[in-house]
């Protein structure tokens, strides 16, 4: 077996659902606390807070699930296992500048020096 995990191993569907469920529970609890569902209030206000908390949790679950799934589609599986040995923000076709004039590549717009 190899030591490098594949993309499928990194983000299994159960993990995606768990991440979305965790975010949904967090959003629902925050909504319930902010609406005062755990305080001494009339039953109508607590019921309204439960409904709005459930809606917030459901929307958060769907948004997180779709967002993470779309982000995973943007990753090329071949790129996940490839070793990165250069800076990511530098284009591949750029070469480092030469420090010596003799090492510098000749540009097309430079006139040639006359030979003696």
Image: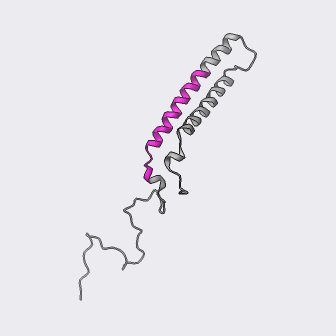
- The residue positioned 53% from the left and 57% from the top of the image is 2
Q: Is residue 86 above or below residue 37?
A: below
Point out the image quarter for the N terminus: bottom right
Relative placement, left or right, of 80 versus 19 is left
The residue drawn where x is 40% and y is 78% is 100
Instruction: Give the residue drawn at x 69%, y 24%.
Output: 33
* 21 lies above or below 48: below
> Within the magenta stretch, is there residue 59?
yes
Position of 25 relative to 5 (above/below): above
**Residue 24's image quarter?**
top right
Quadrant for the C terminus, please: bottom left
Q: Residue 24 versus residue 14: which sits nearer the camera?
A: 14
Quarter of the rendering containing residue 22: top right
Highlighted range, magenta: 53-78
The chief SS type of the magenta part is: helix
Q: Position of residue 18 (x, y in %)?
A: 59, 35
């Amino acid at each position: 077996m190899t030591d490098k995990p594949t993309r499928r191993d990194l983000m299994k569907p159960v993990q995606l659902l768990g991440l979305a469920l965790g975010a949904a529970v967090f959003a629902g609890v925050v909504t319930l606390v902010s609406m005062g569902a755990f305080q001494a209030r009339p039953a109508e206000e607590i019921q309204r807070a439960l409904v709005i908390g459930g809606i917030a949790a459901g929307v958060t679950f769907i948004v997180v699930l779709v967002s993470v799934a779309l982000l995973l589609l943007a990753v090329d599986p071949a790129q996940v296992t490839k070793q990165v040995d250069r800076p990511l923000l530098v284009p591949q076709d750029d070469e480092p500048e030469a420090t010596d004039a003799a090492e510098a590549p000749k540009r097309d717009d430079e006139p040639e020096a006359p030979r003696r």
